[in-house]
Image (cartoon, rainbow, N blue to C red):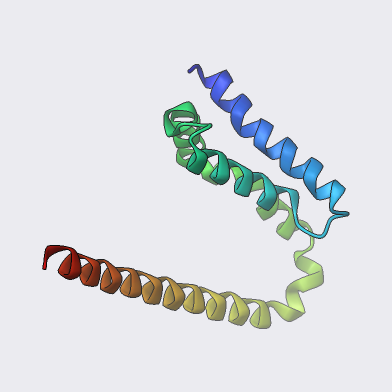
Amino acid sequence: MSYLEQLGVLLGCCVAGDALSLLLRGRLPGNILGLTLLLVLLICGMVKPAHVADTADFLLRNMAILFLPACLGVLDIFADIKTEILGIIAVCALTTLCTAAATALTVHLVCRLQRRAGKEGGA
């Protein structure tokens, strides 16, 4: 598939997620619903990984560009949040540590389950 077709698949999932979010009156964010829709389509085989691989790789390689608007927005309001900067840094550090711990625990549990399944399957 061409890059435009692959981008069309990804954007189609985004638009469908936003539309579904509107139907749900904003109870769930459209971007999350769009990604969930893409995941379901990939699992069901309606969309093959090759249908979106090149464009997804491009977007991942250039992800820093996608964060520029958020960073510039923070710079715009920095004067307002300057007094709370220590609290913000503490929350960022704590959530980073919690995310790392949750990821490590998940990887550990998955590895244990895979080893257990391997022992049971090989016995």
Foreground residue among 18 and 120? 120
* Quarter of the rendering occupied by the C terminus: bottom left
Q: In the drawing, does residue 62 fall left or right of residue 83?
A: left
Which residue corresponds to the image point at 63% horizontal and 25% vertical from the top-left?
A: 8
- Against 77, is 30 above or below? above
Q: Is residue 24 visible?
A: yes
Which residue corresponds to the image point at 56% horizontal and 39% vertical from the top-left?
A: 41
- Against 53, is 92 above or below? below
Which residue corresponds to the image point at 78% horizontal and 57% vertical from the top-left?
A: 76
Q: Residue 92 sits in which quadrant?
A: bottom right
Which residue extends farthest left?
123
Foreground residue among 89 and 33? 33
Which residue extends farthest front?
123
The location of residue 29, given as percent across then percent down, is: 75, 54
Q: Residue 12 sits in which quadrant?
A: top right
Q: In the drawing, does residue 4 fall left or right of residue 56?
A: right
Q: How many marks?
A: 0
Q: Is residue 67 visible?
A: no
Foreground residue among 66 and 74? 66
Which residue corresponds to the image point at 34% horizontal and 74% vertical from the top-left?
A: 109
